[in-house]
C-alpha cells in the first residue's frame, strides 16, 4: 500500500485556506468571545472585591484555532542570540530566527549556510587578538527597516551586545544573511537603530575601552579609553551592510547607552544617553566602591546630540583616521566640525526615545522618577546661540545648557526606563521599580489630539508583574505609530506561573491601549531567550515566501546555486582524496542513499530539497559528524566534513515529512585507512 | 537616590502570591469564561453552517493572567536537542531545559556546568573513531520517572536519536545532570522508555550497523550488521545512570523502531516494533529502489518480545560479551536463554504502546489502516506451546504465530502512528495521513468501564491540522492514566498561522477528551524545536526548588561546592601562569570588578550568585571569550579560559536584575605578552 501524502495535504490545505480567509465570518468569533470574557472578568472583580487594576487580568486576547494574527511582533531573544517572531496580539510564537547562536532545530551552525554566516561574525585576527570563534550572542534591539519613517517589512537588524556585532535578517525567508563585527569595539548596546529610510544602522559602544581592541591599562582610562558610535551603511540593492561605506565617530569614555535616530523634524540627527560620565573605573579589590555606586556619583550625565548629516559630509571629505582599517572621525574633528554636542541629563538615564514628529527627545530617568523631554527646536536654538553660551567637557565637547534644551519633566514614578508612543498623542513609559506602565500626554503639536487633557501630564499607571524593561506599541518606533496594543516586557515573573525550578521565565503582558484607560489582557511567559526589545508591524506589510522561488535556491545569495544538485543529476565525484556529493531530497528518500568514502577524505556535500509543496521541509543529520541541516522546499545547502573516523554512520531526515519519513535515511560508510 | 529593588519585589510577590492561591475564587473565572466561549462557538457554528468538526475550533483553553496550570507537559524539543516544559492545558511555554544542544540563554555550553555535561556526551575515542565533539541532539522521547507505574515527578529521561545518547534531568532544578553515550551504537530511536519503577531506561537502536562503531562493508550486511536494545540501570540514590550495571541485548539487523516497557500484567517484559525485516540496504546509484520502497517490501515485520527479567538474570550470570567494554548479551544467548521472541506484525508499523493494565500491546499500522492488538496472555500461551509451534527467522529467533498472539484489529484510518489511553477504557490513535485522531474502545477487562460501547471498535475521528505524529494524554503512559485532555503533535501547519517564511511551525492542538466526544480546544504553534513526543503530569507531583537550597550550590553535585566563592572571601590567586578567580555576584555588582591577567595565562574562574531571593538570577558574559553563564540564586559555576588574546574585555550581567543592572559589569584586562 502506498499513499500520496503530498496530494492529500494540498487538498486539506486548500479547504482550510478557504475557511480561514481574513475578514470572513470567523472574525466574529473573536469579537463574540471577547464579550463573553469581559463579562466573566467583571463577575470575578465583583465577587472578589478586587480593584480592576488587580484583575483586569481576567481578560485574555482571544485567537480561536485557525484565526490568524493581524500583527507580527519581532522580538530579540536576548542571551539566546536569536530573533523571535510572535503572532500579535495572540502571543503565539511563530518563528525563531537563529542569528548569533547556533540552533540545531533550524539547522543553523551545524553545517551549511548558518556556519558561513556565523563565521563572518567571528572576531578577526587583528589588534583584537587571534581569530576568535564566537558562537553566541546577546541580541538586544531589533529594528525593522523603514521607508519614509515607517516599517516597510523588508529587513530586520539586530545587535549582539556581548561582542559588538550587527546582523541583517531578510524578511522574504525570515533568515539571517549577514553578521558584521564592529572593527573597533568589543561590546555595544545602543544598537540597532536605523535612520528613517534605512540608510544607516546605528551601533553605539557601551563600556568604554581602547578603540580597535588595543590594550591600555586602566590607569590610563581618561586618555586611552573611548566610546564611539558606528554608522553602518545599508545597501538595499544587495540587502547587505556595506562596510566600505560605513564609519564611526569617536566619543569620550563615558558609557554610552541607548541611541536613536531623529525622525521628521530631527531627521539627519541622532541621539544617545550616557552614564558614568564620572569615568569611574572600578573596584580593584582596593576598598573602592563598585561600579553601581561609582558610575552613578555625578548628578548629571550627558545626552549626546550627533549631527549625522554633518558627520556623513565629513566622512566623505576623508577627514577620518583608520583603526583596524575602519574609518573613525576623531573626537577632535567631531567637535571642530560641529558633529557632537552634549546637554546635561539627570544621572544614569536609560532609554532615549524620539516622539513620532521628531520634535521631542524623551530621556527616561532610571534613577530619577521623571521623564525629561528635550525639544529639538530648543537644541537647535542652543547650538545657534554659539560657543559663548556653551560650557565644554574635559575633552572640549560643547555642553548646551539644560535649561535651554529641556521642554518638560513629567513625574511618572520609580525607575522609568523606556517610552513608546501611540497614534493619539500619548506616551507610555515602563517603570522598572514601580512595576507599572505610566501613560502620559505629549504636549506641543500633540495637544490638539487630546484637547481635554493637560499636556505633559501623567494620565494613568497600570501595575504589571514585574519589573518591565522595554515595552513595544504597534508601530511604536515609527513616525506614524498605530497604537491599539502595547506589550510590557517584564523581567521577573515570580509567583505568576507554576514553579519550574530556580530559573524563572520572563513575562510579556499585552495591554489594550485603544481606550481612555489601559487594560491588561494577557500574560505570556518567555523562557527561550530574554525578549529584550521588540517591534510590532502589520502582517499585511510582510511578504514572506511560502516556498523558495526555485529549486536549487541558495539562501545566502537568494538565487539558484550553480552547484545545486538537481533531479537526475545526482552524483558522487572523486578527485584524489576530495569527494564531492550532489544529493537530492524528496518525500521520502535521498539520492544517492549510500555514500562510500575512505577515512581521511575531504567531503564537500551538496543537498537540494527538490520539493515545491510549502511546508515540505526536510532535515539532514549525519550521526557522528555533528551535522544537521534544515532544507526548506527548493533549498540547497552545502557543508564540508573531514571523514576522519571510520565506521558506518546513518544520515536521516530530521523533519517528520511523510508516513515514510523514518525510511528517509542512508548510510555513510567510511572505510578505515588500514583497509584502503 | 538608591532603591531597595529586592524588598519592593518581595512585597509585590507576597501580595500576588496571596491573590493567586490555587483553589481560590479566581478559579471560577476560568469556568465562567469557558461558558462564554462555548456559546460564542455555538453561535459561529450556527452562523457559518459549518460542521462542528470544522470549527469546534472556536473554543480555546482559557487561563487568565495570574492563573496557574494544573498540569505540566514535558515535551522533547526534537532537533533543538532540548526539553520544553509547557503549562497545560494553557500551553504556555514555561521552561526550556537545554540538554544535548548548547543554549546561550540558559548559559549551557558557554563555560560552566553545561560544558561539563555536554562533554560527557561526546563520542569517546575508541573503535568509534577519534573523540568527536557532538554539540547538538535530536531529542525524541521524554520519559518521566515512575514509582509503581505512575509518574513520580523526580526525573526526566530523554534520548538523542542522531548520536545514540540518553540524558537525565533532575526535576528539583529542572536541569540536565548526565548524558551517556551508547557505547555500541551511533543512533537510536526506541528510547527513552522506562520500567515501572525506573529501574531501567530502555534505549533501542534504529538503523542497523556493525556493533561498537566497527566498520563492515554493506555487502556483509546480514552477517555483520546488527540492532540492539540497551537497558540502562538508573540509580535513584545518585540520580545517575550507572553504566557499570547496564547491558544490551543483540538483535538481528532489522531496523528496530519504537519500544516500550510492560506494565502491571506484563511487567518484566519489553516490546518493540521493527521495519526493514527485508534487510534491504539501499540504492547505491545502481538503479535499485530507495529505502522507502526496499525496506517496505515484505508483508510483515516482527514485533520483538523481550523477557527483560530473564535478560537481567542472564546478565548477572555473566553470559555476555563485551563490546567497547560494554556488556552485550549475544543474539545466540538471547535465543537460547528465551530472552527474545518475535511475532509477525503488518509491515512497517510505528508506535508500540501497552495498555494501562499491561494486558494488550498495541501496534500502530502506519502503512496499514488498522491498529493491531496483541494479547500478552496469548503471547505467554504461544511461548508455553513450545518450539514445535514456532517458526524461526534466519538468525534462529522464535516466531510466535500471529493468529495465536493477536487479539483484535481495529480499522481506524490512514497512517495510524501512536496510541495513548484515558481513564475510561478508551484509546486514542494519531492518523498521520488522515490528519485525524481516532478514538476507539478497548475490550477485555476494559469493557465494564463502557458497557454501552462495542469493544475494540472505532468511536470517533476528529480532524486535526495536519499530520499528527505522537499524541499525549495526561498520565497517558502510566498504569493509571488521568485522561481529560489530549494534545495532538501535528507536524504540518500549512495555512494555519501567518506565513513567516518557508519554514513552518508545527501545531500542537489541545483536545478535550473528558466527554463522550472529542472537542478541539486550541492551536499552539511550535517553532523552537520539534515536539516529537511529550508526557503530561499533575503539577502537584512536581516539587521544584524555587531557589537553590544553599549559597555556593553546585548544580552538578547538588551540594555546596568546596570551591565556591563566598561573600568576604573573594580573591584572585596566582601560581605561575595559572590564575584562579573567586568572584561573587549580587544586585548589582561583581566582586572583584577588575581582573588583570597576562596574555597566555590559564584562568579558572568561579562565580557564586549569593542572592537568596527567588528569581534574582544573574548572568555572566565575557566579551571576546565566548563565555555566558546563567547563575540562579545560590548557584556557583566554574569555567576555564586561556587568555590568549590581549586587550580590554568587559564582563557583565546578562539577566536584567535591577535598575542598576547595566552597572553590573567589570573589566578583564589582558596585558600583552610583549609588555609583561
Image (cartoon, coloured by chain):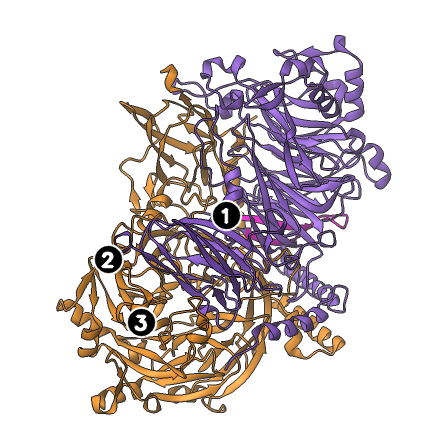
Chain colours: A purple, B orange
Residue range corresponding to the magenta coloring: A505-525
Query: Do callouts 3 and 1 mark residues in contact (Cβ within 8 Å)?
Result: no
What label sits on residue A494 in the rendered view? 1
Of the numbered discs 3 and 2, the one sitting upstream in the chain is 2
| Mark 3 vs mark 1: in front | 3
| Residue A507 in magenta stretch | yes
Position of residue B371 measured from the top left corner of the image (x, y, whole percent):
45, 83
Mark 3 falls within which chain?
B
Query: Do callouts 3 and 2 mark residues in contact (Cβ within 8 Å)?
Result: no
Position of residue A424 measured from the top left corner of the image (x, y, whole percent):
80, 43
| Mark 3 vs mark 2: in front | 3
Position of residue A588 measured from the top left corner of the image (x, y, whole percent):
50, 69
Position of residue A332 measured from the top left corner of the image (x, y, whole percent):
64, 13
Mark 1 falls within which chain?
A
| Mark 2 vs mark 1: in front | 2
| Mark 3 lies on residue | B253
Q: Secondary structure at mark 3?
A: loop
Left-right relation of A438 to B458: right
Q: Name the image quarter holding residue B525.
A: bottom right
Residue at 34% x, 25% y is B600
Q: Secondary structure at mark 2?
A: strand
Front in this rendered view, residue B427 or B130: B130
| Residue A379 in magenta stretch | no
| Mark 2 lies on residue | B242
Left-right relation of A331 to A161: right
Main secondary structure type of the part rendered in magenta: strand
What label sits on residue A640 in the rendered view? none
Amino acid at each position: 500500500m502506498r499513499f500520496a501524502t503530498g496530494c492529500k495535504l494540498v487538498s486539506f490545505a486548500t479547504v482550510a485556506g478557504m475557511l480561514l480567509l481574513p475578514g470572513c465570518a470567523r472574525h466574529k468569533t473573536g469579537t463574540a468571545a471577547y464579550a463573553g470574557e469581559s463579562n466573566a472578568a467583571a463577575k470575578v472583580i465583583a465577587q472578589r472585591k478586587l480593584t480592576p487594576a488587580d484583575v483586569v487580568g481576567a481578560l485574555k486576547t482571544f485567537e480561536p484555532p485557525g484565526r490568524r494574527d493581524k500583527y507580527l511582533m519581532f522580538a530579540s531573544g536576548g542571551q539566546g542570540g536569536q530573533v523571535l517572531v510572535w503572532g500579535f496580539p495572540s502571543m503565539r510564537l511563530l518563528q525563531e530566527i537563529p542569528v548569533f547562536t547556533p540552533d540545531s532545530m533550524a539547522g543553523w551552525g551545524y553545517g551549511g549556510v548558518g556556519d558561513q554566516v556565523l563565521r563572518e561574525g567571528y572576531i578577526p585576527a587583528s589588534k583584537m587578538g587571534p581569530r576568535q570563534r564566537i558562537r553566541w550572542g546577546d541580541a538586544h534591539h531589533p529594528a525593522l527597516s523603514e521607508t519614509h519613517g515607517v516599517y516597510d517589512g523588508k529587513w530586520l537588524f539586530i545587535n549582539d551586545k556581548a561582542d559588538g556585532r550587527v546582523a541583517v535578517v531578510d524578511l522574504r525567508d525570515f533568515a539571517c544573511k549577514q553578521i558584521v563585527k564592529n572593527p573597533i569595539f568589543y561590546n555595544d548596546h545602543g544598537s540597532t537603530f536605523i535612520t528613517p529610510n534605512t540608510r544607516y544602522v546605528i551601533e553605539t559602544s557601551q563600556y568604554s575601552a581602547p578603540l580597535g581592541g588595543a590594550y591600555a591599562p586602566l590607569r590610563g582610562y581618561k586618555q586611552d579609553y573611548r566610546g564611539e558610535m558606528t554608522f553602518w551603511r545599508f545597501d538595499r540593492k544587495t540587502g547587505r551592510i556595506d562596510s566600505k561605506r560605513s564609519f564611526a565617530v569617536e566619543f569620550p569614555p563615558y558609557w554610552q547607552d541607548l541611541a536613536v535616530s531623529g525622525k521628521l523634524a530631527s531627521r539627519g540627527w541622532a541621539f544617545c544617553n550616557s552614564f558614568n560620565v564620572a569615568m569611574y573605573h572600578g573596584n580593584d579589590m582596593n576598598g573602592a566602591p563598585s561600579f553601581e555606586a561609582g558610575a552613578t556619583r555625578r548628578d548629571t550625565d550627558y545626552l549626546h546630540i550627533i549631527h549625522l548629516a554633518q558627520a556623513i559630509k565629513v566622512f566623505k571629505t576623508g577627514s577620518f583616521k583608520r583603526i583596524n582599517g575602519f574609518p573613525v572621525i576623531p573626537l577632535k574633528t567631531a567637535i571642530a566640525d560641529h558633529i557632537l554636542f552634549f546637554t546635561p541629563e539627570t544621572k544614569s538615564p536609560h532609554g532615549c526615545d524620539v516622539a513620532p514628529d521628531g520634535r521631542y527627545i524623551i530621556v527616561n530617568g532610571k534613577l530619577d522618577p521623571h521623564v525629561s523631554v528635550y525639544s529639538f527646536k530648543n537644541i537647535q536654538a542652543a547650538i545657534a546661540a554659539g560657543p559663548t553660551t556653551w560650557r565644554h567637557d574635559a575633552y572640549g565637547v560643547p555642553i548646551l545648557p539644560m535649561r535651554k534644551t529641556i521642554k518638560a519633566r513629567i513625574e511618572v514614578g520609580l525607575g522609568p526606563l523606556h517610552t513608546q508612543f501611540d497614534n493619539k498623542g500619548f506616551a507610555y513609559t515602563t517603570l522598572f521599580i514601580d512595576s507599572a506602565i505610566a501613560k502620559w500626554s505629549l504636549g506641543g503639536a500633540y495637544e490638539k489630539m487630546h484637547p481635554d487633557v493637560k499636556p505633559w501630564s501623567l494620565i494613568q499607571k497600570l501595575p504589571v508583574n514585574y519589573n518591565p524593561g522595554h515595552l513595544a506599541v504597534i508601530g511604536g518606533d515609527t513616525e506614524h505609530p498605530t497604537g491599539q496594543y502595547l506589550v510590557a516586557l517584564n523581567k521577573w515573573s515570580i509567583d505568576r506561573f507554576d514553579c519550574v525550578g530556580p530559573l524563572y521565565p520572563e513575562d510579556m503582558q499585552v495591554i489594550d491601549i485603544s481606550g481612555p484607560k489601559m487594560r491588561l489582557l494577557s500574560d505570556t511567559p518567555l523562557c527561550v531567550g530574554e525578549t529584550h526589545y521588540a517591534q510590532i508591524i502589520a502582517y499585511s506589510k510582510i511578504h514572506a515566501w511560502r516556498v523558495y522561488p526555485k529549486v536549487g535556491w541558495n539562501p545566502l545569495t537568494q538565487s539558484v546555486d550553480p552547484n545545486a544538485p538537481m533531479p537526475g543529476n545526482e552524483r558522487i565525484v572523486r578527485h584524489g582524496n576530495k569527494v564531492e556529493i550532489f544529493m537530492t531530497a524528496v518525500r521520502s528518500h535521498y539520492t544517492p542513499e549510500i555514500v562510500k568514502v575512505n577515512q581521511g577524505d575531504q567531503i564537500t556535500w551538496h543537498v537540494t530539497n527538490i520539493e515545491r509543496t510549502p511546508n515540505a521541509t526536510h532535515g539532514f543529520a549525519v550521526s557522528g559528524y555533528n551535522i544537521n541541516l534544515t532544507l526548506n522546499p527548493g533549498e540547497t545547502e552545502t557543508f564540508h566534513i573531514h571523514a576522519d573516523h571510520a565506521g558506518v554512520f546513518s544520515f536521516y531526515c530530521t523533519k517528520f515529512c511523510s508516513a515514510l519519513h523514518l525510511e528517509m535515511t542512508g548510510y555513510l560508510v567510511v572505510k578505515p585507512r588500514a583497509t584502503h
